[in-house]
Image (tube, grey):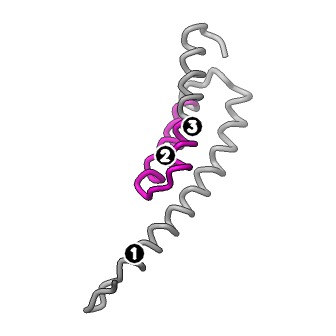
């Protein structure tokens, strides 16, 4: 399904989108590892909780857009866990 006139084909566009997704996901996962280690040392850091949540939310949205249902489901569960932790910390004022 290619087009004429030098415009990239749908397949090439999808390949570029997937390549970008892989690069971005790897960067997010690497940063998540660092952020989770930092959170372990400073569990009351609300901004760090938010940074981690946004990173997971980004992966969920992008994987959903691309139709990666298992990854979307995993990210959704991760968000649920993060929300429970945030609510517990807020409710009990301890983490």
Q: Which mark is residue 95?
A: none
Q: Identify the element where label 1 is drawn.
A: helix
Picture residue at 49% right of the left edge, 66% below the top: 20
Q: For the view shown, which residue lies furthest in the bottom direction?
A: 5
Quadrant where the C terminus is found in the figure: top right
* Coordinates of residue 34 in the picture (x, y in percent): 69, 43
Residue pointed to by mark 3: 52
Alpha-carbon distance for marks 3 and 1? 30 Å
Magenta highlight: main SS: helix
Tell me the crowding category of disc 3: few under 14, some 14 to 19, or many 20 or more residues within 10 angstroms, Cα based: many
Q: Between 75 and 23, which is closer to the camera in this rendering?
A: 75
Picture residue at 51% right of the left edge, 61% below the top: 21
Q: Between 38 and 95, which is closer to the camera in this rendering?
A: 95
Alpha-carbon distance for marks 3 and 2? 12 Å
Lateral position of residue 49 relative to residue 95, left or right: left
Residue pointed to by mark 1: 13
Alpha-carbon distance for marks 2 and 1? 21 Å
Mark 3 in CB contact with mark 2 (< 8 angstroms):
no
Residue pointed to by mark 2: 60
Q: Quadrant of residue 26?
A: bottom right
The magenta-colored residue range is: 49-76
């Amino acid at each position: 399904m290619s087009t004429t006139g030098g415009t990239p084909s749908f397949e090439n566009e999808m390949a570029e989108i997937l390549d970008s997704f892989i690069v971005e996901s790897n960067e997010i996962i690497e940063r998540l590892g660092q952020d989770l280690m930092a959170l372990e040392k400073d569990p009351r850091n609300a901004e760090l909780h938010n940074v981690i949540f946004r990173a997971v939310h980004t992966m969920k949205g992008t994987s959903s857009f691309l139709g990666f249902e298992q990854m979307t489901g995993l990210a959704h569960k991760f968000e649920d866990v993060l929300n429970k932790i945030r609510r517990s910390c807020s409710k009990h004022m301890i983490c």
